[in-house]
Amino acid sequence: MGYKVEFLLPLAMAPLGKFSGFRREGNDWFCNAELPSDICISIEGVNFHLHKFPLVTRCGKIARAHEESKNTDGKTLCMVLEDFDCGPDTFLLVANFCYGFRVELTARNVVLVYCAADHLEMTDEFGEDNLLSKSDSLFHRSILRNWKDCILALQSSEPVLSMAEKLHLVGKCLSALSMMVCTDPSLFGWPMMMYGSLQSPGGSILWNGINTGARLRCSESDWWYEDISYLSVSLFERLIKTMQMRGIRSEKLAGAIMHYCRKYLPGLDRWQGGQGSKTRTVASFSLTPAAVDQSVLLESIEKLLPEKKGDSFCRFLLGLVRVALILNVNQTCRDSLEKRVGMQLELATLDSLLIPNFSDSDTLYNTECIERIVHHFMSPGSSMPAFSPSSIDPQTSPSSESLRKVAKLIDSYIAEIASDVNLKPGKIRSLAEALPDSSRSLHDGLYRALDTYFKAHPWLSDKEKEDLCSTIDYQKLSFHACAHASQNDRLPLRVILQVSFFEQLQLRTAIAGYFHSLDNEIAPAASLTAPGERVGEIIQRDGWMTIVRENQVLKVDMERMRSRVGELEEEFSKIKQEMKSMTKSNSSINSPRLIARKVGCKPQPSDAQPESLNHAGPPPPPPPRSSTKHTSRPHQSGRSRHFSLV
């Protein structure tokens, strides 16, 4: 509830004449008195035509100016209060007080009136119960003891913030608010009037020692988030720092910061998956949201964030990274946010990592930002305590478990962005190599991501594909991944051969392990069953004999294919060298017969007659032709064998 203090001066203190208040004519205020005004005070272009006597008897500043002017000949004294930041409306309240009219002090104007009375030196030296003492009494006895009035007073201090700082009004309000947040809301009852619905009977909440017969319907720890969100960025920052000094738990401060950011950063709540907190405030509060510069807000909030980690907090930080990229805040703020995310990257989710590219780049997603975050995660000293340390299992190794989670997350991220046709292979390789090999126990996720990338980029050369596939450790592929890769026509032939080789190693290891386990099972039953018969039955039962035979056949075919590929490469290099030597020979450039003879083609009968006329005897067959002709048959048979295997 709010406080309103109304008071009238004794009639003896009022000037002579009958007054009915003040009237305004444009930018001029006049007192409805029978006497003409003899002093004019200007504040921000507004002129107050008043009388000396009521002002001089209450305001020390005006009395001193009157003495210095020596204006006793009836001329009007004109004063311009240039350093009076409280505004014309506040001075009108001061004038009403000086004239003895009704003055109403509330939480919305008490700070302004306090600062105005201090500036005009309205102390008890210039009158008993002067305006300064009255506003001071109201501020300390009522405002600082009520949550809502303290918020209102703090919000209204924005125009005179520097003056209120000198009078320690802002600091006292911040301390009072932080104390109320630390205190149980049910002890004094002040939140009850704002956040709870009165229920009677059955309550034991006391107000000034009186049982109100009402109780709070709910008492949640975030009841104060919405109210402090109406403060400006500077006041909110100071309030959070005051609460930190008082020792308020970091999760409560993080909740208040998240609520404040969601209120003034549009779209942030949408990226949090609709996890906005409920708004709990009273209708009579009627606070006005602060005018906030979003860039200033983000740069200020970043310094207030606690050095803690949590699931929702990590998602919130990634939302701030998005906003920072949109608003193009300073580099220091962006780096700090990315570092905070990197220190708890294992708690991130895939959808929160999909940050769109807001620059002029052709790619859909900002992979550079994610790569920097991963580097922050891998940097030394990147550990951060959680909000609830008791929830962490002390028997697990946070480093190895975090590496495993981040590796799985990055592999899923690469698979998600792989469909972008403008994504370069270098970006994929940088992301894949950002984590060490020890972070992936299996490379199935990385293989799946690269296969998705090859499917979306069919124009890639075999060299580019082989360069990307070099990030995969084929020994860490599962049996199903090896089986898929060995039949994947999107992979280069060299990669398929390597995968098939390691697939054979895995199969051989599996068979050896199977027989080893058979030996261990057969040993206890050796006295009952013959070992040879028992092994044969198990092999026939499980079909391992067929697998062994297929393995041997496949191994022979693989060796033949490997040797044939080597022969084809040698033959191709020889033909290439002969073609180069042929082009260097100027005499044989336009001779098709010589070219045909070089490449090993059989000459036509019509071409053989001129050849016999020019030479005495049949020329011996040239060695290149015979070599080429000799190797042409295995080339065709090898190719047919290759296609039959595929």
Image (tube, rainbow, N blue to C red):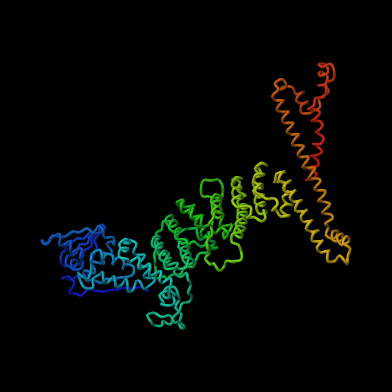
- Across the whole image, how many numbered discs are drawn on residues? 0
Q: Measuring 47% from the left and 68% from the top, which residue is drawn there? A: 249
Residue that lies at the very extreme toward the left in this rendered image: 73
As displayed, is residue 583 above or below residue 57? Answer: above
Q: Residue at x 35, y 71 (%)?
A: 144
Closest to the observer: 423 or 162? 162
Q: Quadrant of the C terminus?
A: top right
User: Could you tell whether 14 is left or right of 424 in the image?
Assistant: left
134 and 570: which is toward the camera: 570
Q: Position of residue 444 (x, y in %)?
A: 68, 54
**Vertical placement of 233 versus 472: above or below?**
below
| Quadrant placement of the N terminus | bottom left
Q: Is residue 579 above or below residue 540?
A: above
Q: Nearer the viewer, residue 593 or 529?
A: 529
Residue 562, position as x, y percentages in the image: 77, 42
Q: Is residue 421 above or below residue 194?
A: above
Please state if 500 lies on the left or on the right of 368 as rendered. right
Q: Quadrant of residue 353?
A: bottom right
543 sits to left or right of 76: right
The x and y percentages for residue 355 are 54, 53
Give the x, y percent position of residue 20. Answer: 21, 70
Q: Nearer the viewer, residue 503 or 88?
A: 503
Q: Is residue 491 left or right of residue 164?
A: right
